[in-house]
Image: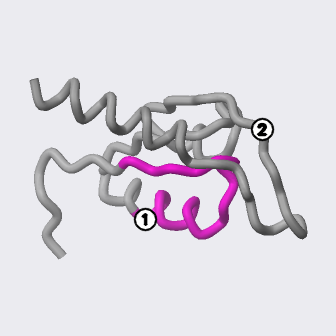
Amino acid sequence: EVLPENMVVIVLSSSGETPEIISEVKNFIKFNIPIICITSSEESTLAKLSDLTISYYFRQQRKDSVFDMASQIPAIHIIEKLANKLKR
């Protein structure tokens, strides 16, 4: 499969430890695609795999130790700021 040049992957994860996300990121790394992660944990597995980590603080709110009820609003705000900066 041919991937576009200048491709970058932006990954959102509150914990930075979601197994499915980590697996997909590892696949992109195999193709030397830069990874930018937006997470609330700078020490997470995802952050360590990423080329650039943009972190924010948000208290995790787990239900049944599986579902993270933490809001992604901080991450969306960061993406909007990046998009606005890039379109100038």
**Residue in the foreground of this view, choosing between 19 and 32:** 19
- The quarter of the displayed image where residue 19 is located: bottom right
- In front of the other: label 1 or label 2? 2
Rendered location of residue 22, percent (x, y): 58, 59
- The quarter of the displayed image where residue 40 is located: top right
**Vertically, is 28 above or below 13?**
below
Rendered location of residue 74, percent (x, y): 54, 36
- The quarter of the displayed image where residue 60 is located: top right
**Residue in the foreground of this view, choosing between 22 and 54:** 54
Please check the rendered image and state whether residue 15 is part of the magenta-colored stretch, yes or no.
Answer: yes
Q: How many marks?
A: 2
Residue 27 disc label: 1
Residue 59 disc label: 2
**Vertically, is 27 above or below 52?**
below
Q: Secondary structure at mark 2?
A: loop
The reply, left or right, for residue 86 in relation to residue 63 is left
Are there few (<14), some (14-19), or many (20+) residues within 10 Å of tag 1? few
Q: Residue at x 68, y 36 (%)?
A: 41
Region in magenta: 10-27
Please check the rendered image and state whether residue 29 is part of the magenta-colored stretch, yes or no.
Answer: no
**Vertically, is 10 above or below 48?**
below
Q: Secondary structure at mark 1?
A: helix
Q: Amino acid at mark 2?
A: Arg
**Residue in the foreground of this view, choosing between 19 and 59:** 59
Q: Residue at x 66, y 61 (%)?
A: 18
Q: Residue at x 22, y 29 (%)?
A: 84
Rendered location of residue 7, percent (x, y): 20, 50
Specify the quadrant that holds the N terminus: bottom left
Q: Earlier in the sequence, mark 1 or mark 2?
A: 1
